[in-house]
Structure formats: C-alpha cells, structure tokens
Image: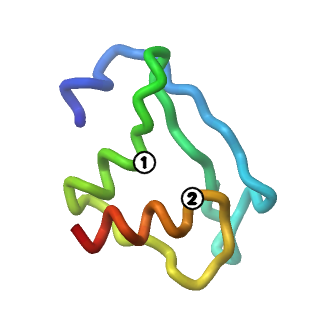
Amino acid sequence: MLEKTKGQKVFMKFDNQKYDERNNLLCYLYLKNKTFINAHIIKEGLVDVDGLTDYKYKDKFLNLQRH
C-alpha cells in the first residue's frame, strides 16, 4: 500500500462519529482515483476491524478481514 500512496494526496470522509473514546480520528481514506485505502490495509492484515462500533462499512470490513 505504501507504494500506491507515497507522494499522493489522500482524501478523508467521515461517518457519524469522528473520534473514538481514545480520541483517535475515525475516517475513510481514498486516493484521487477512488482507491479505498481502508479496504486495502484490511485485506493486507495491517489493521484489526472494530466489530463493536456501528459504522457505514462495518459488514464489508469484517468480511474483508475474514478472507
């Protein structure tokens, strides 16, 4: 993913909740060509998906993490 994002602008979109209880920024990351960065880093196993909080792409993210 680093090769795809290095030197590029990243666009953030927000869900209903902008920060979690630890003050982490919660957002969806996209490249100009609409590459959904969140999905790629989940597929690569670089992050763990939050299964407790409700958000727009929860089911999609959990499914990506399982496969």
Q: Position of residue 11 (x, y in %)?
A: 57, 27
In the picture, the quarter occupied by the C terminus is bottom left
Residue 47, given in percent of the width and then of the height, sits at: 33, 63
**Which quarter of the picture shows residue 13?**
top right
| Callout 2 amino acid | Tyr
Q: Secondary structure at mark 2?
A: loop
Residues 20 and 50: in front is 50
Asked if disc 2 and disc 1 are in contact, CB closer than 8 Å, the reply is: yes
Q: Secondary structure at mark 1?
A: helix
Disc 1 packing (10 Å; few <14; some 14–19; many ≥20): some
Q: CA distance from mark 2 to mark 1?
A: 10 Å
Above or below residue 10? Residue 49 is below
Residue named by callout 2: 57
Q: Dot 2 surroundings within 10 Å: few (below 14), some, or many (20 or more)?
A: few
Point out which mark residue 38 bears.
1
- Residue farthest right in this picture: 16
Pinpoint residue 66: horizontal percent, then vertical percent: 27, 73
Left or right of 59 in this view: 3: left
Q: Position of residue 28 (x, y in %)?
A: 57, 45
**Which of the image's four quarters has the N terminus?**
top left
At label 1, which amino acid type do we have?
Answer: Asn
Horizontal side of residue 1 vs 33, given as left or right: left
User: Of callouts 2 and 1, which one flags the residue occurring earlier in the amino acid sequence?
Assistant: 1
